[in-house]
Image (tube, rainbow, N blue to C red):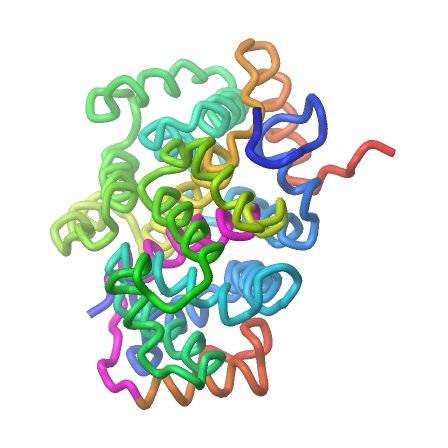
Amino acid sequence: MAHIKVDEQLPGIRGLMDFRPLTAKPLNALADALLRTDEGLSKGERELIATFVSSLNDCFFCQNIHGAVAGYYHPEDEDLVDKVKRDYKNAPVTEKMKALLSIAANVQKGGKFVYEQQVEDARALGATDIEIHDTVLIAAAFCMFNRYVDGLGTFAPDNPGMYRERARKIVEETGYGGSSPK
Amino acid sequence: MSHIPLEEGVPGIRSLVMYRPDTGKPLYELAQVLLRDESPLSPAERELIATYVSHKNTCKFCASSHAAAARYLFDQESGVVDLVLDDYQSAPISDKLKALLTIAGRVQEDARTVSDEDVALARSFGANDRDIHDTVLIAATFCMFNRYVDGLATLTPTEDAAYAQMGERMGTIGYVLPQKPA
């Protein structure tokens, strides 16, 4: 049971967005601006960072929905998301992505954990300013989304098919802003 | 020195939203709705929750600027802000606000630790669903802002006067997306 009265048919953040549409609007706009662009990082890479941070925060709903979206963008390897969550340093992603995931991991601990050398290493592997910026903001944003979802004790189904279908709809049809919580 | 090139002399979040206005816009809209729109919590109380969480995350820029906004909004009772940061349980605030600060503190540490008892205690002092929702989302949102601001090592002014000026602006005009100087 969630800590506040939300529609129990709506899992995770969807119940919360239905409860308070006025805050849902900028939250969805932020997700669209951050995750649904290929400028610098691809959409698939952005969703991987979001999934990875949500997994560090142990947020079941967020890591499963964003894991399903990330999986949609990486049809060539259905285990990629799990490999990144388990051990990103040995996962089949670029060295630049590994460097950005290490920055994201430190943002998850706290902003001050990100250190100069870490940023320089990412740059040496080809990361641009905007990619570094977006990595930090995606990681920070998921430290918010995860806390919102878990802090209010929302429910999360464990049926993988639900997440896959919702992910397909987000990618192909609605984005985040255009998706109704219902 | 910030980790990416930002507008010279512009501090904290302002430099970041100038760098990437398309993510800045929803971030400022979120702050405005969450901290200024209609809520059972006053803007001063909401700024206090934001300050408390930022202080716990040791984000000097966010803690100092929101503390200044809270002092401005508490007006005659501005002294309450430092008393809360020192020890909120003994500060001259309502029992309801104390119980909500406990919830905010849990969200900052690990949102999964917000317990039914924490929520029941807040309710016993008159908190309703909206109080609880807004408290959790404010705490979660500042876990994002704090990480964003510190994760990119933005400029943090050290003089109190700089923050007092920011606090007055935040207390009067609220959160309006700053424009890059021409």
| Direction from residue B6 to residue B66 in the image, left or right | left
User: Which quarter of the image is occupied by the N terminus of chain B?
Assistant: top right
Q: Position of residue B93 (x, y in %)?
A: 30, 27
- As drawn, A112 above or below A13: above
- In the rendered image, residue B182 lying in the magenta stretch gets the answer no
- As drawn, A160 above or below B139: below
Q: Can residue B103 be seen in this view?
A: yes
Most common secondary structure along the magenta stretch = helix
Residue at the image point whose x is 62% and y is 62% from the top: A33
- In the rendered image, residue A141 lying in the magenta stretch gets the answer yes
- As drawn, B53 above or below B113: above
Q: In which quarter of the image is residue B104?
A: top left
| Direction from residue A34 to residue A49 in the image, left or right | left
Question: Looking at the image, which is closer to me, A174 or B66?
Answer: A174
Q: What count of labels does the image hold?
A: 0
Q: Where is residue A109 in the image (x, y as percent from the top left)?
A: 31, 42
Residue at the image point whose x is 70% and y is 40% from the top: B18
Q: Position of residue B57 (x, y in %)?
A: 34, 32
User: Which quarter of the image is occupied by the C terminus of chain B?
Assistant: top right
Residue at the image point whose x is 42% and y is 42% from the top: B41
Residue at the image point whose x is 56% and y is 17% from the top: B157
Q: What stretch is highlighted in magenta?
A: A133-160
Residue that lies at the very extreme toward the left in this rendered image: B117
Q: Where is residue A5 in the image (x, y as percent from the top left)?
A: 30, 68
Q: Is residue B134 visible?
A: no
Q: Quadrant of residue B128?
A: bottom left
